[in-house]
Image: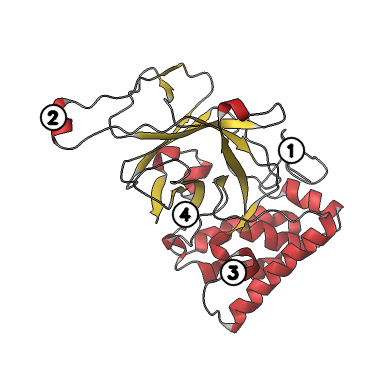
Amino acid sequence: MSNWDNAVGPSPDSVGQTSRSSAFRAFARRHGVSDDAITRLLWSMEPAVYFEREVPESVGPGDRVIGYIGGAPELPLDMEWEVGDIFVASFDLAAVPRTLFDDGLPREGHLLLFTRPDAGGGKTLHIPPGTETTVRPVPVPSELEVQFGSSHMMLDRWTMVASRHDAWDAHAWLIGEDHGGIWGEVESEEAEWHAQLEAAVEEYAAKVGVRPAMDNSAGKLRGVQRNVHESWTKGTETFQRLREEAVLELRDAPDRFDEVYDRAWRQLPGAPLLHLATFNLESLQYDWMDGEISWMISRDDLRARRFDRAELHWLG
């Protein structure tokens, strides 16, 4: 089953979300998944679109192209491509598959990602539809910049093709070792919370007949970062406790999920960041670095589409 099959979940077209939870809850209910399991999944999982890089000549008619990696970016006419801003990728948001979970991304315009030569920082740019753009030439460092060691790296051009697998990732590794999460010992109450979430995943898989992929090392748009981001350090336990409180609160009013979820996020210490995108540096063919680069964004900034506030993090 794949996210091209409307019967199992995400489809290439809008699924008609009226809220973060409405489409997923309606779909899961039709397959007999309990409201308790649905609440746990909605609370703890983030939707993800996995993708592969392909040489343009190998892309087939059945492949879903969602953008490109490397080469030269198309930028607004009033924007320059600055020396040292390495262009990583451009997502065609209208081509990115919808998911039953609302991933918070617009489905119009283009999302461009940049990094620096040392992966120590980056930029994120959302270009709205209708913006006049042009392909910028490769920046040429000035003589002074060259004297101070500046150069401009340009990545090879690849096509991004969306995976055909349903995909989720768990917030802050809130799921067991079978899915590559939970490092070290957990207290008895936390162990129970983990077990309840895993049971919800198993119930969904049994009832729906699809076990969504959970691969934190994959190239992806949204989902979660490969490791637990530092912003989650103080919020993980609170996030799980609030989830179980919500399960009880929502048993008589599951349609209030979004209200309860929004309230809970305001209670989390430190405002944990959400994952926006991940790329493997080896797959990008960085000659002298390995690991992964991930762009992170606050929940409020994602909702407001303030992609210019996203932060880049390197995991070596």
Q: Mark 3 and 1 residues: CB-CB less than 8 Å, in contact?
A: no
Dot 1 amino acid type:
Ser
Dot 4 amino acid type:
Leu
The residue wearing badge 2 is 144
Residue 67's spot in the image, x, y percent?
A: 55, 30
Dot 2 amino acid type:
Leu
Q: Is residue 113 above or below residue 253?
A: above
Of 232 and 18, nearer the camera is 232
Q: Mark 4 or mark 2: which comes first in sequence?
A: 2
Q: Mark 1 or mark 4: which comes first in sequence?
A: 1
Q: Residues within 10 Å of mark 4 (few under 14, many from 20)?
A: many
Of 93 and 40, nearer the camera is 93
Residue 158 visible: yes
Q: Residue at x 31, y 46 (%)?
A: 118
Separation of disc 3 and disc 2 at Cα?
A: 53 Å
Separation of disc 4 and disc 2 at Cα?
A: 38 Å
Q: Mark 1 and 4 residues: CB-CB less than 8 Å, in contact?
A: no
SS under mark 3: helix
The residue wearing badge 3 is 240
Residue 93 visible: no
The residue wearing badge 4 is 273
